[in-house]
Image: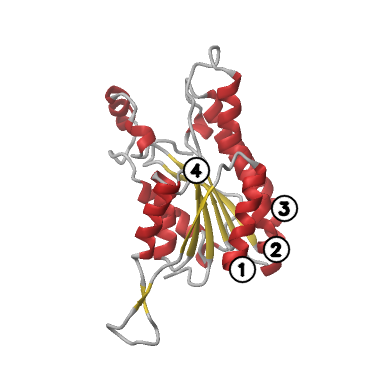
Amino acid sequence: MILPGRVAVVTGASKGIGRACALKLAKCGASVAMLARNREKLEEAASEIQNIGYPNSDSGHGGTRVPARAYVIPADIENEDQVKAAFKSIITEFGKIDILVNNAGITRDQLVMRMKRADWDSVLSTNLTSAYLCTQQAISSMLKQRWGRIINITSIFGQMGQAGQANYAASKAGLIGLTMAVARELGSRNITCNAVAPGFIQTAMTAQLPEELKQNALKMIPLGRIGSPEDVANCVAFLASEGAGYITGHVLNVNGGMLMG
């Protein structure tokens, strides 16, 4: 338990990397507020978190266990009013916010010459603008307590680009710029802002890719395996901890060596 008493907010927490991050932070002792559109999947993840539990310090070894706290908030994080309402609800429930993980993301792939404006706008809004909105809402609490951790989930494709993903790559590159700007603005208040850049990770999103593409990607990974959501979550938990207190404005690559330098 490296995060006892901390309150974490994770967006896109109903599946994949977001769900893994919520579970990991809970296992580290944090209370977790989980945002996503799908209430049913959020409830499933919350049940798993609540079953983690911790030994009751007053009951001795083998005594009762205290369930981890999970708070479900179905919300469309593209909607500013819903974001504001969600964060107000979190403050009411927990009294503060210590950790924010901006993870929510979608893809709408197409070659740039054929990409529809609606698909560009939707990806930028979900992947980038939502991070700005959530960060803005979380900052007040962090400033009051002079402690905070903001962690943005970007992507290897925000660093190297990807054909057919101009909107996705642009949104993830934008997250890196946002990370560094926020790190500079808030560093003097003991609030860090970092990014985690996953490479090829086994999620529902990547499961839909053609097998040939997966095999070609695998050949580019020196560690010789596709990453797991837990690989990313472990790094998020570290950046959220006291141990990462002197790291800010950094992009932590979690890609098996697929991109170096």
Mark 2 sits on what residue? 143
Which numbered mark, 3 or 4, is in the foreground of this view?
4
Mark 2 vs mark 3, CA separation in Å = 11 Å
| Camera-nearest residue between 199 and 131 | 131
| Whole-percent x, y for residue 29 in the image | 44, 68
One can see residue 126 in this view: yes
Query: SS for tag 3?
Result: helix
Residue designated by label 3: 185
Amino acid on which the number 2 mark rests in the picture? Leu
Q: CA distance from mark 3 to mark 4?
A: 30 Å
Q: Quadrant of residue 117?
A: top right
The residues tagged by marks 1 and 2 sit, at their Cα atoms, a distance apart of: 14 Å
Mark 3 / mark 4, whichever is N-terminal:
4
Q: Amino acid at mark 1?
A: Gly
Which residue position is annotated with label 4? Answer: 37
Relative image position of residue 247 (x, y in whole percent) = 57, 57
Q: Which mark is residue 173?
A: none
**Residue type highlighted by circle 3:** Glu
What is the three-letter code of the residue carrying label 4? Arg
Q: Nearer the viewer, mark 2 or mark 4?
A: 4
Q: Residues within 10 Å of mark 1 (few under 14, many from 20)?
A: few
Residue at position x 34%, y 31% from top? 220
CA separation, marks 2 and 4? 28 Å
Q: Is residue 232 visible?
A: no
| Pointers 1 and 4 in contact (C-beta within 8 Å) | no
Query: In front here: 131 or 221?
Result: 131
- Secondary structure beneath disc 1? loop
Q: Residue furthest top?
A: 113
* Residue 64, image quadrant: bottom left
Q: Identify the disc placed on residue 95.
A: 1
Q: CA distance from mark 1 to mark 4?
A: 23 Å
Relative to 20, 88 lies left or right: right
